[in-house]
Amino acid sequence: MPTTISSSSLDGMKVAILVADGFEQAEMTEPRKALELAGAQTQIVSPLDGSVRAWKQLEPAGTFEVDVPLKNADADDFDALLLPGGVANPDALRINQKAVAFVRAFVESGRPIAAICHGPWTLIDAGGVQGRRMTSWPSLRADLHNAGAKWVDKEVVVDSGLVTSRRPGDLPAFIREMTTMFELAHEAAIH
């Protein structure tokens, strides 16, 4: 599980967690818990109003309240972005123009992004993978390659403000690298 993190290393940092129904529950809850333990403020942003439904593999799982409906969200209000996977979640996000524009704002500003499993699908549509070294769930390999990324089969890959991982089993490494990257960006922003 997550490594021990200083309870104040991310104080004041605001992290958007962009999801639709069908995200893999552990890929949202475990990174969120680690970020909040480090002092970050996390908010679930979604094109859905009210709540979103997680999945655990192929079964419905928990329901989570949406903190900021996407229609009211401003990417400039956040310092970093988390994109959990699950198949249905990023598939719904990548065809939603507001979701793609929200992600594109992080890509264009250079703010840190963490994406796991199928999460990088939305990054493709937001123009965020060209020339990047990254990983994902194996079925995204051709999509990422065709969009100009260099796909590798590793538990975690960090490249210029982007951290990616393949699956829930990679969460310890993903959380470690995401937190380190977010800490470096946060420190640079406050100094």
Image (cartoon, grey):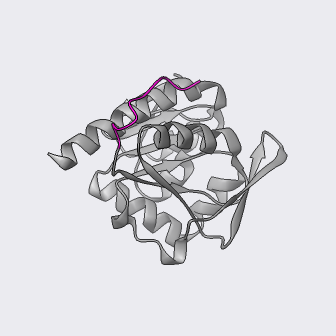
As drawn, the residue found furthest toward the right would be 59
List x then y, in percent, for residue 167.
63, 31
| Residue in the picture at 45% in, 27% down | 176
Q: Is residue 16 above or below residue 113?
A: below
State the predominant SS element of the stretch in magenta: loop
| Residue in the picture at 34% in, 54% down | 79
| Nearest to the observer: residue 10 or residue 146 | 10
| Nearest to the observer: residue 43 or residue 17 | 43
List x then y, in percent, for residue 27.
62, 40
| Residue in the picture at 67% in, 55% down | 89
Q: Would you say residue 152 is visible in this rendering? A: no
Q: Is residue 85 left or right of residue 182?
A: right
List x then y, in percent, for residue 11.
34, 46
Q: Would you say residue 66 is visible in this rendering? A: yes
- How many numbered badges does the structure rendering display? 0
Where on the picture, by quarter, is residue 9? Answer: top left
List x then y, in percent, for residue 135.
51, 32
Magenta span of residues: 1-10
Q: Is residue 52 above or below residue 47?
A: above
